[in-house]
């Protein structure tokens, strides 16, 4: 029997920055996905406690995006990347809310890859699982979710430079709570909106160069007002991530909270990935005594908000702890 656990993640700040080589500050969380398998046979067969239908994937899975049931696409994407020489039969269980913006798909991919015997560094694991996600979903996602799941550090957020792929752990001070609260709106990335946002950013890069090195003054060279706003979000968000990493390391919860609030406004107004339900939730969380800041987390279009607060300030949602990255446990 092989058992692997992969955590989900919550992103404290830095959304829609990873796929243009920007900065992000997520942490791996205690909620995650466990895959237990017996190795053998010539297919990968998994049951999930949360899904009515099992997944059966041959070792040469063809096009992962064509697999049914849909959750099997992520498994097939991983099989296509890991290319195990023998099959496996087992179960998937998760403590993550699925499709809530806490990277349930990345946790599934990383846990399946480890259970199927993936050998490599956490970065190699993350890159293989990022490709698996892209093949499975058709969404041109960045590497943040898979890298956080693979490389998490207990008690720390991860400052990730998505150009160099360097991961710098930043301690989360004692006496601060990170809470995720669901907006009540299911989130799906599979629509074209994520790809459209990415294309707009790439359009900006083609004119003003890497957004990570650009300044707000460079925005004047962008003629299209929509592309300009998308780039303004990314450039300003990279600055906020840098500042938030410093503030977090100094234990400056008020400073981090203010940056989270600004991040939400930028994602709402310039990047346009928030929803009325997320905006209302973020406002309500922010108005709660003991909350330092709140923002949507992940891709947006529904799913969760994340709040930074004093212990016990929020009694709803998921109180998240920073944990180590994915591992094989048996
Ligand atoms: C999704 C993607 C990530 C990242 C976020 C937005 O979670 O998988 O790569 O782009 O959206 O920050």
Image (tube, rainbow, N blue to C red):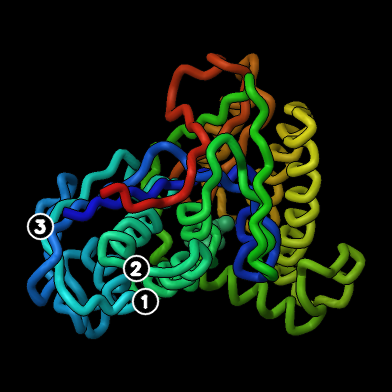
Q: Toward which corner of the image does residue 198 lie, by quadrant? A: bottom right
> Foreground mark, 2 or 3?
2
Work out how far the residue at label 1 is from the one at label 2, CA to CA, in angstroms: 18 Å
Near mark 2 (Cα within 10 A), the count class, few <14, some 14-19 or many ≥20, is many
| Residue at image mark 2 | 118
**Mark carried by residue 53:** 3
**Mark carried by residue 257:** none
- Asked whether disc 2 touches disc 3, contact meaning CB atoms under 8 Å apart, the reply is no
Sequence-wise, which precedes: disc 3 or disc 1? 3
Near mark 3 (Cα within 10 A), the count class, few <14, some 14-19 or many ≥20, is some
Question: Which of the image's four quarters has the N terminus?
Answer: bottom left
- The residue at the far front in this view is 330
Does any atom of ligand 1 lie closer than 8 Å to the CB of label 3?
no
The residue at the point 64 percent across, 14 percent down is 289
Sequence-wise, which precedes: disc 2 or disc 3? 3
Kindly tell me whether residue 243 is visible in this rendering.
yes
- Mark 2 secondary-structure assignment: loop
Near mark 1 (Cα within 10 A), the count class, few <14, some 14-19 or many ≥20, is many
The residue at the point 34 percent across, 42 percent down is 96
Q: Is residue 169 above or below residue 116?
A: above
Front residue of 219/110: it is 110
**Mark carried by residue 135:** 1
Where residue 168 sits: x, y (%)? 68, 52
Front residue of 128/1: it is 1
Front residue of 156/75: it is 156
- The residue at the far right in this view is 217
- Mark 1 secondary-structure assignment: helix
Does any atom of ligand 1 lie closer than 8 Å to the CB of label 2?
no
The residue at the point 25 percent across, 49 percent down is 330
Where residue 81 sits: x, y (%)? 34, 77
The residue at the point 18 percent across, 46 percent down is 50
């Amino acid at each position: 029997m092989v058992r692997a656990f992969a955590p989900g993640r919550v992103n404290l700040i830095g959304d829609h920055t990873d796929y243009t080589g920007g900065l992000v500050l997520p942490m791996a969380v205690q909620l995650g996905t466990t895959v237990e398998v017996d190795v053998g046979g010539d297919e990968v067969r998994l049951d999930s406690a949360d899904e009515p239908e099992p997944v059966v994937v041959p070792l040469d899975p063809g096009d992962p995006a064509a697999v049914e049931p849909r959750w099997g696409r992520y498994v097939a994407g991983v099989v296509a990347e890991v290319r195990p020489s023998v099959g496996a039969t087992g179960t998937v269980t998760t403590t993550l809310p699925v499709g809530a913006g806490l990277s349930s798909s990345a946790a599934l991919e990383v846990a399946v890859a480890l259970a199927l015997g993936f050998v490599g560094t956490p970065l190699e694991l993350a890159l293989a699982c990022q490709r698996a996600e892209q093949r499975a979903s058709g969404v041109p996602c960045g590497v943040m979710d898979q890298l956080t799941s693979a490389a998490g550090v207990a008690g720390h957020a991860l400052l990730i430079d998505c150009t160099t792929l360097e991961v710098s752990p930043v301690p989360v001070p004692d006496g601060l709570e990170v809470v995720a609260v669901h907006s009540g709106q299911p989130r799906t990335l599979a629509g074209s909106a994520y790809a459209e946002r990415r294309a707009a950013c790439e359009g900006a890069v083609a004119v003003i160069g890497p957004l990570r090195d650009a300044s707000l003054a460079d925005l004047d060279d962008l003629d299209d007002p929509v592309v300009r706003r998308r780039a303004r979000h990314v450039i300003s968000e990279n600055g906020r991530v840098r500042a938030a990493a410093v503030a977090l390391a100094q234990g400056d919860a008020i400073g981090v909270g203010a940056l989270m609030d600004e991040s939400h406004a930028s994602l709402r107004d310039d990047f346009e990935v928030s929803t009325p339900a997320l905006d209302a939730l973020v406002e309500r969380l922010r108005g709660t005594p003991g909350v330092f800041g709140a923002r949507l987390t992940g891709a947006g279009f529904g799913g969760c908000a994340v709040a930074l607060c004093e212990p016990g300030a929020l009694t709803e949602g998921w109180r998240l702890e920073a944990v180590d990255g994915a591992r094989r446990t048996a």
